[in-house]
Each structure stands twice: as C-alpha cells, then as structure tokens.
Image (tube, helix red, strand yellow):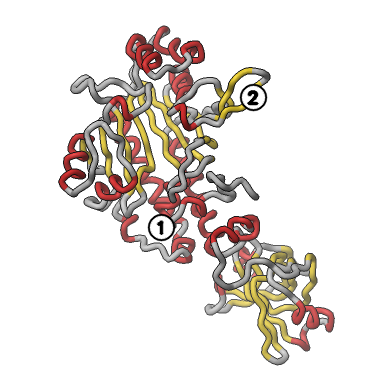
Amino acid sequence: MSIATEVRQLGRHDGASVTVRGWVQTTRTHGKVAFVVVRDGTGIVQCVVVQKQVPPAAWELCGALTQESSVAVTGSVRADARAPGGYELAVQDLVLIGPSAEYPIQPKEHGVDFLLDNRHLWLRSSQQRAIMRVRNEVEQAIHDFFYQREFVRIDTPILTAAIGEGGAGLFEVDYFDERAYLTQTGQLYAEAAAAALGKVYCFGPTFRAEKSKTRRHLTEFWMVEPEVAWNDSADNMRLQEDFVSYIVERALARCRDELAILERDTAPLERVAPPFPRIEYAEAIRVLQARGHEIEWGADLGAPDETVLASDYDRPLFVMNYPREAKAFYMKENPADPRTVLCDDLLAPEGYGEIIGGSQREDDYDRLLRRIRAENLPEAAYGWYLDLRRYGTFPHSGFGLGVERTVAWITGRPHIRELIPFPRMLTRIYP
C-alpha cells in the first residue's frame, strides 16, 4: 500500500511507496525512460518512469501527457541531490485524473494583456507561485507582529457613508435608496475601537476609484491599519519602522527560495533596520528643487519625487509634516507650524515609493469640525466620528500600509498588478 503525501513531505518517506497528486509541469522521454515533473502546490518532484517497471497503460500515458494535466503518481521515494527538493519518485504507476488540452500559457513570451486575461492560469507559473508565497508570508507576519504586541484586530465595514480620503476616489453604490461608498480606509472606525481597546488594527480590502494607470495603483487593494491610543506622531513612526523591519526580516528568513526564483537581490533588504532616516516636507521640497524638479511648497509629492528622495538612502525614508491642504481632514494640526499637519509618508528605496501613510489624528473637536466643513464633507455622516472628540477625546495616531506595494518592494517586481491574485485596475475587472 502506498502512502498519500505531499511533495514537501517526501523526505519523511525515503524508501517508501507514496502517491502524490498534482499537475504536470513538463515531460520528456529518452528511449524507454520518461521523466515527468509534477507540481502539487507544496513543491515539485521529478518522477522517473521506466517502461518495464510500470503497467503498459501507465507507459502509454507518459507519451500522451500534456502541460497541466492532473495526475496521481505512485512510486518509491529516493534521495537525489540533483532533484528539486532533494528527492525523486521511481514511478510504479501513473493515473490521469484530468486531461489538459491545448493549455493557453506555453513556455514562451506572452503579452501582459494575454497573461492578465488568463490570470486564473498564469498563477500556476513558478514566478507567480513564488510571489503568492511571499505575499502569504508578509500577511502572516503582519498578524504575528500585532498579536505579539497585544493589539486587537477589528473588522471594519466595507460599505460606509463616511469618506476617509479624497472624495474624487470613491466608488458609490446604491444602499437601499441611500448613498454609500466602498471603503477607502477602515481608519475612522479603528479610531473608535482604539478608544475602547487601546491598541487595534484592521486588515482588509480598500477601494479607490482613481483613474490612474501607473505601476503603483490598483482600484482594489489590501491595507493594514493600526491605531494606537496615546501615541503621538513620533511614537507612530517608531511603530512603523519596527513593523516594516519585522516584515522584511520574516520574508528574508522564510522566503529565500521564492526570492531566488524571482532573482531578487536581497542585499538592499538586509540593510532594513531601525532607525529609518527622517526629513521634513519643507526640506524635501528644497532637495527636489535643487535637482531640477518643478514643485512648489504646498504640492503633494509624485512618484518621481519620491524616487529621487529615497535614492539618497539605503533603507526606507520618512517624509514628515506635509501641508494641511495636501493631506486628509483628520490629521492633527502641527503646533510648530499650523500650515502643516503631523503626518508622515514612508518611502521604500529602489524606486518603490510610498508604502505607508500615517499621522497623528486631530483630537480637538472644534478644529476637526472646521476641517470637515472646509472640505465640504457631509457633516451628518461624521456625527459619530465627532463624538469621539466629544466624549473623552485623547491623543492617538495610526497608519496604513499597502500590502501590494510592500510585496512589490520585497520581491523586486516592477508592477503592482502581479502582487495580488486577481488585480482590479482602471481597465480590468476580468477574470
């Protein structure tokens, strides 16, 4: 009797007869010996088929197998240092489970649109599998970081009447004859939870109806947003640099094989450690102007600006205290310069730009109400948010880290569309 197992567990069964189920990656035949490489989701294994050692039907099947056919392979496990994972299967039987006719993605160059149209199949490629494993590790690291520090996860609504960021980037939906939006952020609700639990975070999909086609933008992406009672802006940045350093360290420790598949130079990642450098927004503008950028004080930074600023440093860079008009209504006025707010953007090096936006939140009721009115936001929709300042207001801060941008930086991928299983972009909602 054979033992049903996964490829990653073959080392536990050296010399035993096992059955592995998976998908055919490649086949080749040399005379009376055939080689079938099978992937099962946990790894790949080379299966060696000798004609005289298998039933005639199994040998005949070897010649008919096509890419991505699903099979069950039974064979004895044997160590081989040259094989992927250090083990291969000496096949005793081979059974076809699901044939694969004319598989669309072949071992050749394909256009991006073709690959995205076939995203449900493109995910099976070695590089895309590696990316998804790194993403999985990053997401698990996120949860572990906050769990170890006794944060409480809060699940915030996806449908909301309150706008968290710019009104121009909203997906409006009909909500039983009322106006509602797909959430841009869970932050406002996390602030309410911080007053109850002290240290909280939310983690989920967010939506931005921005008509942008850059390599950094998706219309649906995932964001983690911690919120901490009593933390000021400086505390907030210390939490961010500890958090990012932890995520990078986990990816380096547990995803070396995947990063190698992606040909990622890990040397820049190995330099990521606190403290991260910090510069004021005003200084950033002076630097950019000195380098020929046509940007004036008061403007938000664009992707080229972020790339230039970050290129001077070997680890992520904080740009702090932007002008009030360039940032969201909820950010706290800077006592040292009321034209600005206590906030930061964390810029990843190597041209990856902003991965975190954070701020101390405005805890003064009157100032917050003035900002809501100045932004022409629907005051009634923010009654509950203003209540947080009516009933025991408190200093607090938080930030949002974009998962896809962070994984893009860690993996060294040039475009954000590869960093989520099924990307949603300006011109793409299929598959």
Out of 414 and 196, give the one closest to the viewer: 414
Give me the residue at 33% from left, 52% from top. Answer: 351
- Please count the marks in the image: 2
Instruction: Give residue 46's position: percent from left, percent from top.
Output: 63, 75
User: Which amino acid, mark 2?
Assistant: Asp
Instruction: Give residue 153's position: percent from left, percent from top.
Output: 51, 30
Give me the residue at 79% from left, 70% from top. Answer: 96
Q: Which residue is mark 1?
A: 412
Of callouts 1 and 2, the N-terminal one: 2
Give me the residue at 19% from left, 48% from top. Answer: 292
Q: Which mark is residue 174?
A: 2
Instruction: Give residue 409's position: percent from left, percent from top.
Output: 40, 52
Q: Where 220 sits versus 358, above or below?
A: below
> Which is closer to the viewer, label 1 or label 2?
2
Q: Where 411 sits versus 371, above or below?
A: below
Asked whether the viewer can see residue 74, the reply is yes
Out of 342 and 369, give the one closest to the viewer: 369
Q: Residues within 10 Å of mark 1 (few under 14, many from 20)?
A: some
Asked whether the viewer can see residue 141, the reply is no
Give me the residue at 23% from left, 23% from top. Answer: 339
Q: Where 387 sits versus 141, above or below?
A: above
Q: Secondary structure at mark 1?
A: loop
User: Which amino acid, mark 1?
Assistant: Gly
Q: Which mark is residue 352?
A: none
